Amino acid sequence: MSRPEIGVYLPQMGFAFDDLLHRARRCEELGIDSLWLFDHLYGPGMPEYPSLEAWTVATALLSRTERLRVGHMVLCNQFRHPVTLAKMATTLDQISGGRLSLGIGSGSIEDEHRRAGLPWGTFGERSEQLGETLAILHQAFADERIDFAGKHFTVTDMPVKPGPLQRPRPPIVVGGVGEKFTLPLVARFADVWNVPTYALDQIDRKVAVLHSLCDDIGRDPATIVLSIEAVMALAPDEASLPKVRSLAEKRFGGPGFGLHDTDLIGTPAVLVDKLGALVDAGFGQIVLFTHDRCSDGTLELLASEVVPRL
């Protein structure tokens, strides 16, 4: 069993920056591989709740750590022009010493677009825009220059220098499972495919579809890292498990979180077995919501009792 990348997903709503920095530094000290933020203008469904801007936070965290990878699960393509995004990504990859993971998707919350006056469009239109952005990013990272004429974006002889430190590029993570629009983009452009929590009950079918799409275009599906996003409720012992389970149910028991599809609930020994099964199934990256939003105790338990046994 090979060692997967283990990361934690920490949507930044309700956190002061010092709270986020503390968690990032604890992850780094403990050997957790990556930390992932969300990219929303406010917490979905909670517009009055404080939430720091995603790219600014990632920049600040990467400038104050030395080994931790930081990314977004995932950036909203509508928020940044692809040329600007390419320049931002190459710059941050340089600043961080090559520790940026570039997650991107077509957007998921109509309300924040409406409030901000940003175009929403159909899912098909947003997917077309995402495809053009991905093509532009590939060109920018490979050639340090963009020449692109598409339906939504036209870019003429635009230099992007310096290019990224990571070669051939910062890993591009595309999340989602839509068979008509998203998975074809994964097959063409993604280095990492993330299965989000809302699709954890469909993994086998979606993997099969992705493999078929890769066959259609002559890509080896083994060149795409399979990634999973899942809620984990980790208890130090059996006595504390009911309280941990209760908190996980309260925060993540609703539809869309997939708490019981992976059932990552239990003591370290139980979690080693369940996460090991995901690794055996081919997942090379596991990104975990924790039931208590990455408390010191849970991060320490994950790093000391679970990760070394994978």
Image (tube, rainbow, N blue to C red):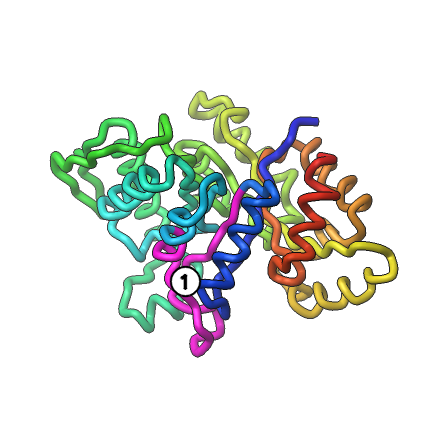
Q: Residue at x 22, y 34 (%)?
A: 162
Nearest the camera: 66 or 8?
66
Residue 208 occupies which quadrant of the picture? top right
Residue 103 visible (yes or no) = yes
Q: Residue at x 18, y 38 (%)?
A: 149
Element under disc 1: loop
The residue beneath circle 1 is 40
What residue is rendered at 60% in x and 53% in y?
197
In this rendering, would 177 be left or right of 47? right
Task: Give amino acid for label 1.
Answer: His
Q: x and y percent of residue 9 in the render?
A: 55, 53
The relative height of residue 301 versus residue 187 in the rendered view (above or below) is below
Q: What type of secondary structure mainly makes up the magenta span?
A: loop
Q: Position of residue 222 (x, y in %)?
A: 54, 24
**Can you say whether 200 is above or below 49 in the image?**
above
Q: Is residue 35 magenta?
A: yes
22 and 225: which one is in front? Answer: 22
**Magenta segment range?**
34-58
| 259 falls in the magenta region | no
In the rendered view of the protein, which quadrant contains the C terminus? top right
54 or 307: nearer the eye?
307
Location of residue 240 in the rendering, given as x and y in whole percent from the top left corner:
82, 62
